[in-house]
Image (tube, helix red, strand yellow):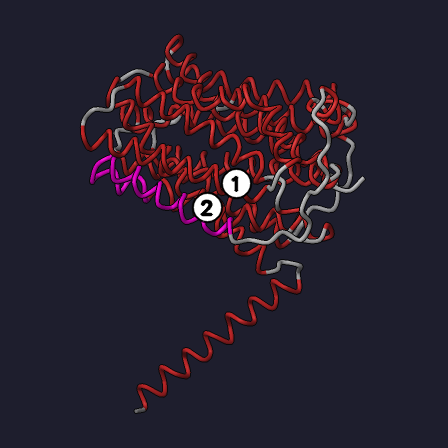
Amino acid sequence: MRFAAGRSAVKGRNAIAILDGLQQLDSLGFNRSYLRYIAARAAAAVALQMTGVAVGWHIYAMTGSAFDLGLVGLVQFLPSVLLVLFVGHAADRYNRLRIVSLAQLFMALALFLISLGTGSHWLTRESLLVLLFLFGVARTFEFTTAQTIIPSLVDQEVLPRALALGSSVRQGAVIAGPLLGGFLYLLGPSVVYATSAVLFLLSASLVARLQMAHQVRRHEPVSLSSVFGGIAYIRSQPVVLGAISLDLFAVLLGGATALLPIYARDILHAGPWGLGSLRAGPALGALVSSLYLARFPLHRHVGKTMFFAVALFGAATVVFALSHSMALSFLSLVVLGGADMISVVIRSSLIQLETPDAMRGRVSAVNAIFIGSSNELGEFESGLTAAWLGTVPAAVLGGIGTLLVVLLWMRLFPQLLQREQLRS
């Protein structure tokens, strides 16, 4: 009886603690719709990272080609280029939650087909790349539209904090994803793909049940002006253009993470679990940075802070490229991820705070090309230069190129360098 009473008391205290935590989140403007949405994004982030581990190790084991590792990034980048204007206009014209949930259903379907093909031994290099291209088409709709939803779930006053908290949750998932993916890969790549597909289905279900506070109702007629509106808006905002393009070239040149399968197997002599650990490194650094920014939002020197963060990203890339120690490689990736997250939060806040809701879809589509898809294009660039120059020289060159871009952008975009606060 005492034991049962003790357990009841513990459960009661836990329930009170959970309620207190929810009340604190509500007091910060984080309502339950926002928290459900963040949970959905976390599930999708775990699935995406698990897929990245499986695909990288799978295709490198299949072909042994650094160029093919680059092709994995390219086939997922091309849909963003081909569909950028259509996706942005669709996000401003139709129900954004429905677009995200349907896109995630198609992503799950593509992964189920890859899992089936791998388990049945009919999946070839070419068929894998085709299915990844289709996966990239769905992800283009999902990634672009998902960026526009958070401002409709929270008040603008807490938007920077909400973006940072959302990044914290996602990065926690990104840490777990590669580790889980590397562990499950020991059971076979088909297991990883199937598990990722189930997580995308879970995320789609959560998103489909949400209610946004502000639905976009204006159906602007389709015209060249409306379709290209996002590009025109960004060009008219030097601070936004500078922030987006700075991140573009940093990720494009510093995409050494695409070479992690080569580093894990041939340089650091680790297995799939080691690859998962390396992929978790940037996420761990990003988690620490995002938690700090969620607790202590930036109020001053946001421009200088962004330039410093991107420079640190480039320097950490060089250290990783030259390392032959698993510990040093992991630490440099942690620093790289932390610096990148600072830049991401600043850029995301600037874009969301300075873009009208009716334009967010088109601006987010252009932003997805510059930032989200530059990850895949950066992977292709790293794979291509590694095939030409070798793995280590290619990674070193990317880090040095990032540092040079920082210096050049400080001269080209003085408005960004001198920006003091997130709000103009």
Snapshot quadrant of residue 52: top left
The range drawn in magenta is 180-208
Q: Quadrant of the C terminus?
A: top right
Check the image and report above or below for 193 versus 23. above
**Residue 309 appears at what percent x and percent y?**
61, 34
Is 96 located above or below residue 322 in the figure?
below
**Label 2 crowd bin: few (<14), some (14–19), many (20+), radius 10 Å:** many
At 48% from the left and 39% from the top, the residue drawn is: 102
Checking the image for residue 204, the label placed there is 2
Residue 90 among those drawn in magenta: no
Residues under numbered marks 2 and 1 in contact, where contact means CB atoms less than 8 Å apart? yes
**Farthest residue toward the left?**
120
Task: Please provide percent x and percent y for residue 416.
Answer: 75, 29
Image quadrant holding the N terminus, namely bottom left
The reply to whether the magenta stretch includes residue 190 is: yes
Residue at x 75%, y 22% (from the top left corner) = 225
Residue located beneath label 1 in the image: 100
Q: Outermost residue toward the right?
A: 424
Position of residue 280 measured from the top left corner of the image (x, y, whole percent): 40, 40
Disc sitting over residue 20 in the figure:
none
Q: What predominant SS class does the magenta segment belong to?
A: helix
Residue plotted at (26% across, 42% down): 184
Q: What's the residue type where badge 2 is placed? A: Ala
Q: Amino acid at mark 1?
A: Val
Which of the two discs, 2 and 1, labels the residue nearer the N terminus? 1
The extreme bottom residue here reads 1
Classify residue 225 as left or right of residue 6: right
Give the image quarter of residue 343: top right
Percent position of residue 228, x then y = 70, 22
Viewer-side residue, 187 vs 130: 130
Q: Quadrant of residue 179?
A: top left
